[in-house]
Amino acid sequence: MYLNPVPNSKAPPIEHSIQQIVREASLLYCLPDNPFFTVAEDNTPHAVQEATYAYAGWLFAQHFLNRLGPAYASLKAILNENDPDQADVLAKIKTRLRDETFTRENIRDVILNHPELIRQLYINFAMVHYPASDEASQLTPTLSFQRIKTEQPLSDEDLYSAIWKGAQSPLAAQILEALLVFNKHILKCNFYQPTKVALSFRLDPGFLPEVEYPKKPFGMFFIVGSDFRGFHVRFRDVARGGIRIVRSRDKENFNSNIRTLFDENYNLSATQTLKNKDIPEGGSKGTVLPSLGADYSRCFEKYVDSILDLLIPGQSPGIKGRIVDVSGREEPEILFFGPDEGTADLMDWAALHARARGAPWWKSFTTGKSAEKLGGIPHDKYGMTSLSVRQYILGVYKAHGLKEKEVTKFQTGGPDGDLGSNEILLSSDKTVGIVDGSGTIYDPNGLDRTELIRLAKARKMIVHFDESKLGKGGYKVLVDQKDVKLPTGEVIPDGTVFRNEFHLRVKADIMVPCGGRPGAIDVTNMHRLVDADGKTNFKYIVEGANLFITQQARLWLEKKGIVLYKDSSTNKGGVTSSSLEVLAGLSLKDDEYVKDMIFQDGKPSQFYQDYVKDIQQKICENAANEYNCIAKEYARQKGATPRTLISDQLSTTLNKLQDELEFSDLYDNAAARRAVFERAFPKSLQAKVGLDELMNRLPEHYQRAAWSAWLSSNFIYQYSIQASNVDFFHFFSKLSAGGN
């Protein structure tokens, strides 16, 4: 680069050279410690762009090489996954196959040992995704791109043949072929974006093997940063879900998290889809895996910014230019993020950053925002999740003729948490035991309710419970205590172990998990919930906490006679609230949103208060409708199918019907469409904006999702899972005619 070009030079202006340096420097910023910048001594070093591509391909291969193969598929077909023991065997075989077939080290070595094939794979990628607008503009293509233009690109078929001929072994060929699969499934990426903080790739999920991932996602993002990697998976175009930071204790745990990262993301997203059965948004989830010692918040910020690169069209050449999108999609792609482990206090930043980058949908980009500053609707303050759980608890009491004040209850998750505190405040039962992060508290005659309410309102753990209020036989054991003697004379050696296993020894009429780690009850310990005489520790379980009980354990417990309602049905109040928070963000203009959703002088507007009440009412209606639907189907089948499977069947039926309706010509029936929106959208929002204006403002793909979600859920809830086509005809005809 010449700062003072000679007179009459044809060299490009200095500004162009600087912009091209910035373009390549951004790749160095994204991945400063890239092992592929140099190769064997007798080979030419990779150029910056080529080496960066090799790194992204290396990570892709680590996650997506099909490491199970036909033998696993055959074994899976033979074994019964509903049998706890067989499912456990299958899971162990799956883990072992993944650990032993390909390692990060041998994938890296194959890439290093095949520089010419990597060069051809990069050219194959660049010929599709290098922006043509750059070549047509005054900006000269980067030197990296000019170099590859001198190469003769191979067709996909020739490149595939070259891989299998030139690879040093069949194993190496399989690894290199994974990079070709990567190329063929990239729909758009920010690789050639002039400025960026991490690499992001929007992928077509078609490459995922069905034997491992039976339900194909709608879309997925793959994000690669200098100190993290991440994914985002969604099962419908309009979808919402939390972004989770996966933390690692040490190197061994980090390596384990790498192996399970995508599976965790996929499974969480699929579970979210079951829960989101009666709202417009399908299920989605994002995961961020920071490297050891990385700043979690910075990793999250880079994750969000790199995804925004693919959602917001670039308008500033040299800074944020246009990218190549081979998806053929015409309408803008929008994602909706929510809080999850490690990101609850980062939702405000994400919304404000989207706003700063010019995203018109910044108000709905994240849920879980602070109410006072950004108009969010906090679940804990208004008890959104607890309201849906309570509908199931009350349904159980009514169905079995129980008086709540006489019912004994055990609860995981203490008065300091969202679910735990609200369950205490909304209930009037005889709570005999609670475990939380600080320890265990128990009173066979029922814990003092006034004291529990005091702690719940103050959001304090049970360590603060006044022990003088414990009755005869009551005790409190904290996690840091050793050799505690109980009133029975039993000595507890370790308070932490006692807390972790207390849910397996305590007895009560009902257990309501409101917190705790996933899989707290699984095939290895479920037998401890049944005594030597075959009597279960609990008669009823309403699973408020996500994934507290594994699927196999749920089915086994139901066989033992426990009335159990699973998480994807019971705790959907939070997702309903978040869905309507998204709706407010999409519906209100910026000035309306600031005036009506963001607190003024620390106080909510009348509209905000009315909208919250509408949300609470909608949560209770949906939960009660689903509870009744499951209970009626269980009674119709005379208990032949467990409630757990009926819940899954209901979710599957609703999601399938919603998919069929969303793009059907029934949407063109204006009278029926309007009738649905009158019932689906909160009355306070309709009064504020007007239904006609709402229909003008909302994106069409969102309206279709809202229409199909309300139509499918209300039809099934009213007519049952076994409803016929004739039933739907009558249901839809009434809507078209303006009936109920």
Image: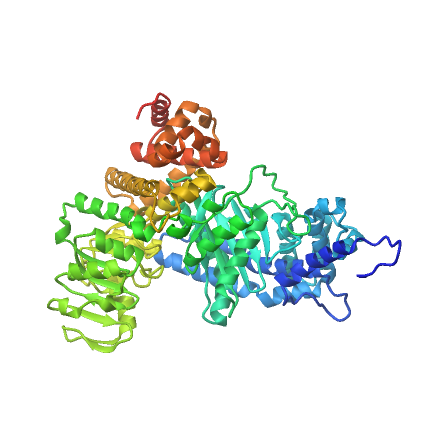
Q: Give the residue at x 29% y 67%.
A: 500
Query: Measured along the vertical axis of the image, is residue 252 above or below residue 574?
Result: below
Quarter of the view holding residue 137: top right
Q: Please provide percent x and percent y for residue 512.
A: 25, 55
Q: Give the residue at x 77% y 54%.
A: 148
Quarter of the image that includes the N terminus: bottom right
Q: Is residue 306 left or right of residue 630?
A: right
Residue projecting furthest to the bottom: 483
Residue projecting furthest to the top: 737
Q: Give the residue at x 48% y 55%.
A: 349
Count of numbered tags: 0
Query: Measured along the vertical axis of the image, is residue 575 above or below residue 91?
Result: above
- Asked whether 140 or 16 is in front, the reply is 16
Q: Please provide percent x and percent y for residue 211.
A: 49, 50
Q: Is residue 253 left or right of residue 137?
A: left
Q: Please provide percent x and percent y for residue 123.
A: 72, 53
Q: Is residue 615 visible?
A: yes
Residue projecting furthest to the front: 601
